[in-house]
Image (cartoon, grey):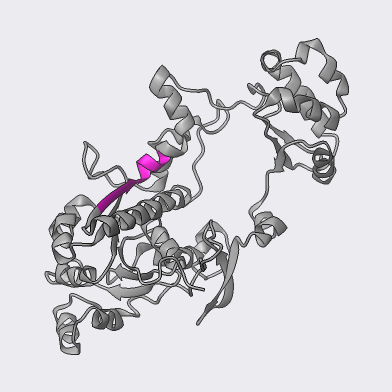
Amino acid sequence: MTGPLDNIKVVELSTWVAGPAAAALMRDMGADVIKVEAPTGDALRAFSLRNLGYETDLNTAFELDNRGKRSIVVDLENERAGEVISKLCSRADVFITNLTQPRRKRYGLGFEALKKANPRLVYTSLTGYGTHGPDADRPGFDYSAFWARSGIMGLMGEPPSPPPLCRGGQGDHTTALNLALATLAALRLRDSQNRAQYTEVTLYGTGVWTIAGDVSASLVTRTSGPRHDRSTPPNPIWNSYRTSDDRWILLVHPAPDRFWPLVCSAIGRDDWSADPRYDSAPKRSQLSAELSTAISEAFAQHDLAYWSQTLDQHGVVWAPVATIPEVVQDPQAREMGFFHSIDHPECGSFETLAAPFSIRDAAVVPRGPAPGHGAHTREVLQEAGLSSDDIDDLKRSGAIGNQ
């Protein structure tokens, strides 16, 4: 089965997570992705899971975001580096980069420069905060630009506890979806207009988009919503509760009047359904502290297994607060193909995440392990039209690696 991006060539000049992850998704869809790395390699190559307490030497982070690509080493500080990148882009469909604006200008890798090499190139720009404005040159990572600056962090956690950190790569992988979407849209526009296209995605903007409900309200009111306090939630059946075996359950009921009787029945309090004190969402909101305490006491009487069965039987909308090991063993995740096995020439077979979407009549799957550093330098340059003598000359100049 063919991929939806077969015959599309992507040149990726980006590091860490968001840019590489977007290119990895395009590779899953069949694109040929050329990863351009510095002589020292992508910074993510040095990542160690042991620093996070995981007992493995396999760099699952790098493998995840670079699966199936081909790697070429180019020293951007070399005066001939721009010549190499320009040559690659002349035969490519897409160029993805997270270089800062000053570095793009210094190396001659801006949109206007590469458009001369390829009048039909889609140029995809990723930055922390954007390419214009007062913070255009400010470095940004998912922790800073996506999580903190966007306002997400300020609304998370229960008061008065400090706002929590996000998990590593959380903002990056969300941004990668935006990046891939924008690139695919630009490809379609390129084909219809037959000319180069420029698209821009930021970590900051993606963060703001993910919290759009709060931001759109603030655009009108110029105020902020409160941080969630589970002891006094606006809706006591949209809240987390602890079970007797120290697990947590999340109830989710955006239509509280419809689901209130179901929750009452599940926890053995049918009398609440007929109680005039609780017969509307506004009344229950005013008494949320009282109700949340009573509901907490009810959930504390039984373990997660009991509540799993009971809540389902009563049609309550809920979910367990799962651990990551539970997620990777979840039959639903398995049935939906969340994970995919990869054969690695050095590490053997291991599982990684599949793309978070599928296309019924096309192959969207990881297509092999991440490449060795610069393993395809000569192969890729030959495909770009350089002769063996040209490649040897670039090696001697130090513009490309020795692989």
Question: In front here: 15 or 267?
Answer: 267
User: What residue range appears in magenta?
Assistant: 198-207
Would residue 283 be found to the left or right of residue 70 on screen?
Answer: right
Residue drawn at the location 30% of the way across and 42% of the way down? 129
Q: Give the percent coordinates (x, y) of residue 155.
A: 50, 30
Q: Give the percent coordinates (x, y) of residue 13.
A: 29, 63
Above/below status of 214 relative to 117: above
In reply to whether residue 43 is colored magenta, the answer given is no
Figure label count: 0
Q: Give the percent coordinates (x, y) of residue 246.
A: 76, 41
Residue 154 seen by the camera: no
Residue 75 falls in image quadrant: bottom left
Residue drawn at the location 71% of the way across and 17% of the way down? 284
Residue drawn at the location 87% of the way across and 19% of the way down? 271
Would residue 108 be found to the left or right of residue 365 on screen?
Answer: left
Question: In front here: 370 or 43?
Answer: 370
Q: Residue furthest bottom?
A: 388
* Image quarter hosting the C terminus: bottom left
Would residue 297 be found to the left or right of residue 356 on screen?
Answer: right
Q: Give the percent coordinates (x, y) of residue 392.
A: 18, 86
Question: In front here: 277 or 261?
Answer: 261
In reply to whether residue 206 is colored magenta, the answer given is yes
